[in-house]
Amino acid sequence: MHQFYKSKKVLAVYVLTALCITSAGVYAATEHWNDASLTPQTVTRTSLSEKTGWQEWKNSWDAVKSNYEQVSLAPGADASRLNFGWYSKKKSDTAAVRISRHPDMQNAKVYSGTCKPGTVINGVTYYTNKVEAVGFKPNQTYWYQVQLNGEWQPAQQYKTGNPKDFSFMYVGDPQIGASIGQTPADGSKKQDGEIAARNDAYNWNKTLNAALRQHPEINFLVSPGDQINEPAAKGDAEKIQLQEYQYAGYLSAAVLRNLPEATSIGNHEEKADRDFIDKTKVTFDGGEAVIGLYDDTATREFMEWQPIVFTMEHTDGMIQMTGFPEATFQRDKEKGLTPRTGDIALNLEKKSVIIYLQDKEHSDDLIPIGRVVSGIEDLSATKGVFQAYLMPTKKQGKAKL
C-alpha cells in the first residue's frame, strides 16, 4: 500500500495492490501467488469471528461460499446518500433499509427500494434488492439494518466523513479465485476454482483489515474491476455457481459491512451473466443459440418484433443483422465497447446489430445490448448469408417476414 498524497482539504488516495497482497509483489494468477496456508498461525477479522485462523476458515468455507445474501454498500451521488444492494431468497413488494442514529435502532427511518428477479443459483432464483438512503450528515455515526427475507438483520455501523476532506482506498484486481491451478503448501494437488476462491477470499479479508489498521481514516473503497475471476461466459449453471462462490468470498470481508465500495466492471466481469430483461432463441440451419438481452430501449423494441425471420451474415468473426428502424440508432449515451466473444451490440456507424464470435478492438460506435448465453459454437459454424428464426423464450407466435 502506498500513500500518494495527503493534506488538509485535499483528496488522499491509498493504492492497494492486486490479489490480496500486503507487502509482496503485485501478481495475480501467476506462480507468485499468496498461499494462505503458509501462515496458519495468522488470525484476522472475518464475517466468522474477530480472530479467524486459516483452519477455522477452511472448516467454515461451505457456509461462507454459499452465503449469497450479504449486503454491499456503495457511495451515493453525493455524501448525503448511500446505496445498499443484496440478494434475497424471498420476493417482496419493496426492498427495505432502515437508518438510525442509535445502535438499538430507535427512531429509525425506513427507506424503500426495488426487489426484482436476479440470478438463478443451483436451481434457486435469488432476488436483487436495491435501496438508496438519503439525508446523511458529515462526520456522524449511523446504524443501518436491511430487511432480508422478511426479517430485519443485525444493526451495522456506518460513519460518514467530511466531503471536503476525505480519503479513499483504490484496489486493483481483487480477482477472487485467480489462484486457480496453484498447489498450496498444505495440499498435494492444484486448486480448483472453488478452493482458489477459499484461499483468495481469506487473503482479501487480511488485506482490507491491514489497510484499515494503517489508515482508519479511509472513507470508501474504489475497485476498477475484476472483483472475481470466473466470467461464466457461457451462462451454464456450474460456472454461475462458481461465480457466486467467488462473489460470496469477496463480500465476506467483514469491513465491507461498514465501508462503501465503488466498483466497476473489469474484463472478467465483462463476460459475466448480467441481469437480462429477456432471452431470445435463435434457430437456424445447423443449430440454435440463446441470447440474453439487457434492459435497454432498443432491446425492448427488438423484443416487440419477435417472433421474426432475420437475414444474418457471418463475416470476419461477426454475425450482422440489418434492417432496423433508424430511430434505434439515435443514441447519445452509453456508447463504447471493447467487444468480447459472445457480446451483442448495436453498431451506430453500420446501423446493424452484431453478434461477436471473437474478441475485437474497442469502438466508440458500439452500444452493448446483450450476450450469447448458449450456442456460440453453432453460431461460429455458420457461413456467409443465412436465415434465422428469432423467438422469445417465453412466448410463441407466427413469425414476421
Image (cartoon, rainbow, N blue to C red):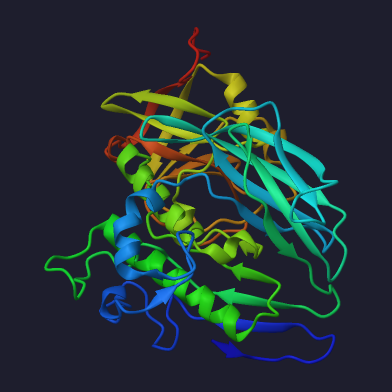
Q: Residue at x 54, y 58 (%)?
A: 265
State the quadrant of the N terminus. bottom right
Which residue reaches farthest left?
188
- Residue 128 higher or lower than 34, as above or below: above
| Figure label count | 0
In this rendered view, identify the residue nearer to me: 310 or 268. Answer: 268
- Residue 191 is left or right of residue 255, and the answer is left
In this rendered view, identify the residue nearer to me: 357 or 20. Answer: 20
- Residue 317 seen in render: no
In this rendered view, identify the residue nearer to me: 302 or 237. Answer: 237
Q: Position of residue 326 (x, y in %)?
A: 69, 34
Q: Position of residue 215 (x, y in %)?
A: 64, 84
Q: Residue at x 78, y 67 (%)?
A: 160
In this rendered view, identify the residue nearer to me: 310 or 182. Answer: 182
Q: Residue at x 79, y 56 (%)?
A: 102
- Residue 198 is left or right of residue 268, and the answer is left
Q: Residue at x 75, y 49 (%)?
A: 332
